[in-house]
Amino acid sequence: MPLSLITRRPRILDRIGRLVVPSEDQRIEQMLAAARTFLAAGTFIAIYLEPTEPKRFVSLIYLLMGFYGIHSLAIQFLVLIRERATRAFRLTVHAVDILWPPLISLFTSNTGSPFFLFTVFVLSAAAYRWGLTETITTAVASILLYSGEAFLGPTLGGRFSLLTPEFELNRFMVSAIELLIMGYLIGYLGEEEKTLRTEASATARITARIQAEFGVRGAVEAVLEELGQLFGSDRALIVMTDINTDRTYLWQVARVGGDDHPSVTLAEINSAQHAVYKFDPPAQAWYAARRNTRSASGGFKTLAVGEKGKRLHHSVWAPPPGLLHAHPFRHALGLLLSYGNEWSGYLLMLDPERAPSGESATAFLLALSRHIGPALYNVYLTRRLRSRAGAVERARVARELHDGVIQALIGLEMRMDALKRQQTNHEGGLVPELDRIQMLLRKEVLNLRELMQQTKPLDLGPKQLLDFMAYSVDKFRRDTGIAAKFTSAFEEVHLPARVCNEVGRILQEALVNVRRHSEAENVLVRFASASGYWKLTVDDDGKGFAFDGRLTHAELDAARVGPLVIKERVRAIGGELTVESGPGRGTRLEITFPQKTHA
């Protein structure tokens, strides 16, 4: 639905239009200057070829047309040499344009003159420069000038009475009504065209930054950054709930100082924060302003717009007190978000500077969402499709490894064992060599099983993490013969799925390193918490690292020692890795990461 059907005058479009198309005002002035020059030349030629009008003051009319032509050329020259059209310049030119039609018609036949086309040009110029309200104002100003011309001529007497014919009230009223109707229609069409152009420019600017290569998070951050610039908001929130898992995520955008790129953070909302961020939006889009800006407890005046763009007069929004405490604001612009049967939530822009009235901003944001929402959802579907395709392919490779190469190696190991027994019975000298080959085969079988395990996609949630860790440790014990034990004081943890998957991979990698490098006989894995942090500890009694002591994450990086893959995964979840080791004294890995971690 066009925006102008929702709001009578979208003032916000003037501000946003200058932002998305900075040269728009200059382009309009160049177009109007060319049209003004063409109007002057065309009218002069028309009255020269067919001089039915003017009937009186012919020489004076030709003189006025000459001055108008010079005026048109001067304006066009100024527009060409100026880098931009200022507001004062446009208002001055428009005011002079309003005076020309009544001045010319003063020496012809008022509004019935062919020179009435000059008034049409003035109305069109107002529509293209601004919109509906200014065009109607221009029409009213023209009517007042025409009425002054009609009344003052006979009143002043003398020569001025010769300039105006006999005044006919009914004819003047009809002409005034025609002028108002014409101003309304031209202004409506001009505003509609300007609205659609601004909407298209803003949509193109935002959608150009939505790219599947950057993922859903990158696309959302880009959209939030652009919306913040369009509406002049330094703070914004997006709260989205995964309907299938009932997990809620919070995007926060904050622009500090004069930074061009705001900081964007993403975190999962825990149950204690639901009262702060989860509420029922009052409409598809809404604008709320505090009734008493001096009081923190004042209510909010709400302007709500439905899905079809119609204003809802009885909708009221009362933001949760916790939200006002966590993010104080005077007015806010909100939008309901819904993507299929999978995600639902809202966007909240706090204190948007370019939305002083709210009505036009709400309509504009709703119109933008109809274009940007599907683009974001397509990015989400594309990434999910790629993820599923990758998971299916990894599962297929893992099955082929298990059913093909691993089974063949196990069969070969069994044949080697049988051959070794035969050699033992015959007292052959190949038994040590066969033992070595059998050990190599067993080692490669374990390597392939670990590769298969790492290839399989992990889909862990907080309810599955501890069971997965216990299963992994027990499987490690059965496969390697190394005594391994897992302990934890918890039955369930509250962590985002991404962090759960990373923790699972960290444990897998740590156990692989123990088998390959440590020559340990015992391994102890513990999962605990302390001071707002989760702690995963892996202890072994193997040969340890070459260094002796306790090194932090930064010290490990500086010395270029320690498990590289584990360090990268720990860094990905915002954690810290500490390694305590000594030659012949085993190794202890400590992985700590915050309990309130980002999603």
Image (tube, helix red, strand yellow):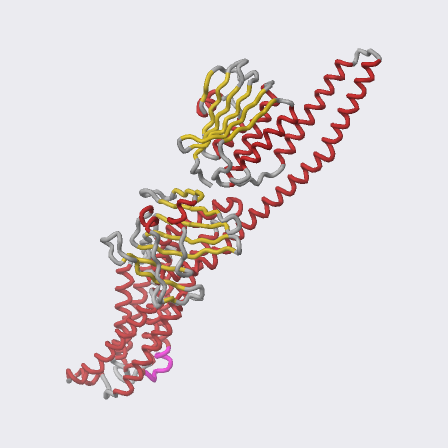
Picture quadrant where residue 523 is located: top right
Residue 433: give x, y in percent of width and height. Answer: 75, 15
- Residue 549, placed above or below residue 383: above
- In the image shown, does 92 or 294 lie closer to the viewer? 294
**187 left or right, relative to 436:** left
Residue 455 in view (yes/no): yes
Residue 126: give x, y in percent of width and height. Answer: 33, 68
Residues shaded magenta: 46-53
Q: How many tags in the picture?
A: 0
Q: Residue at x 77, y 21 (%)?
A: 417
Residue 80 in view (yes/no): no
Residue 288: give x, y in percent of width and height. Answer: 33, 58
- Residue 186, placed above or below residue 165: above
User: Quadrant of the image for the N terminus?
Assistant: bottom left
Which residue is the extreme one toward the right? 426
- In the image shown, does 91 or 107 lie closer to the viewer? 91
- In the image shown, does 460 or 15 lie closer to the viewer? 460
Residue 330: give x, y in percent of width and height. Answer: 29, 53
- Residue 528, placed above or below residue 333: above
Magenta residue check for 137: no
Magenta residue check for 50: yes
Picture quadrant where residue 44 is located: bottom left
